[in-house]
Structure formats: C-alpha cells, structure tokens
Image (cartoon, rainbow, N blue to C red):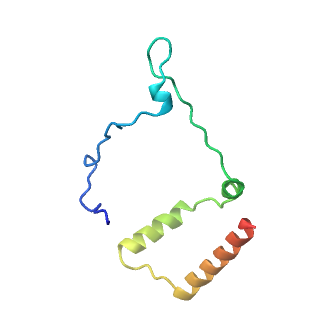
Amino acid sequence: MPIDINNLGIGSIRNQPSQEKTTSESRATPDNTAATRQDEVKLSQSAQRLTGAGSHAPKIDRAKVDRIRDEIAEGRYHVDPIKLAEKFIALESELSSVRG
C-alpha cells in the first residue's frame, strides 16, 4: 500500500504514545519510576571499514560547490554522460575492493 508523503508538513507528524511498553519501561525501580535503559550500537566489520574510509575523504572545495550550485540554478550546468558513467564505474570498482 503506497504512502502519500506529498502533503506532510512539519506539524503533520505527531508522536503517538505507544500502547505497548518495553520490558525496561514496565519494570519499576524501588521508588516506582521506570528503569533507565541504555542503548548500544555495534557496527559490522563492513560498516567499520566504510566509516574508516570516510576519514581519508578529500576536503570539500566550497567555492566549487557554490559555483556548481549557481550554474544548476541558472540552467548552465552540463553533465557529460560519458564522464559520469566512467565515474560510476570507478566508484563501483572502489566499493568492490572495500567489500572484500
């Protein structure tokens, strides 16, 4: 069933209280308050390699970004489909070597 998100505004989504309580919420401490649960995140080896790869990313050239943004807004930005395809192939090759 498709979900229509076109008419959603900032105030359209409201937090609804959950009808079900988690184990930690239903368990009370001696002073009758809900126990505090601590979340934990564990990254897979692949995710760890990808996050490490991000630290070697080149610096962002803000002047270039601004120039390209202006060219796009003014309809002057041209995309060379051959060059774009070559970049995608190079990226896929690089990602394949990271995946192992």
Query: Is 7 on the left or on the right of 64, as rendered?
Result: left
Determine whether, in the image, residue 62 is placed left or right of residue 41: left
Please identify the quarter of the rendering in which residue 51 is found.
Answer: bottom right
Looking at the image, residue 15 sits to the left or right of residue 27; the answer is left
- Image position of 91 with respect to 52: above or below: below
Q: Nearer the viewer, residue 5 or 59?
A: 5
* Quadrant assignment for the C terminus: bottom right
Residue located farthest toward the bottom when viewing the structure as drawn? 82
Residue at 65%, 61% (x, y): give it: 58
Give the residue at x 50% y 23%: 35
| Count of numbered circles in the view | 0
Can you give x and y, in whole percent of width and height, for residue 19 in the image? 34, 37
Of residues 15 and 62, the one nearer the viewer is 15
14 relative to 54, above or below: above
Q: Quadrant of residue 92?
A: bottom right
Residue ID at (44%, 78%): 77
On screen, 66 above or below 77?
above
Task: From the top left corner, tell me how far across and down residue 61 is, in percent.
Answer: 57, 62
Q: Quadrant of the N terminus?
A: bottom left
- On the image, the x and y values in percent for residue 62 come to 53, 60
Above or below, comparing residue 49 to residue 100 in the picture = above
Residue sitting at the far top: 31
Q: Residue at x 46, y 64 (%)?
A: 66
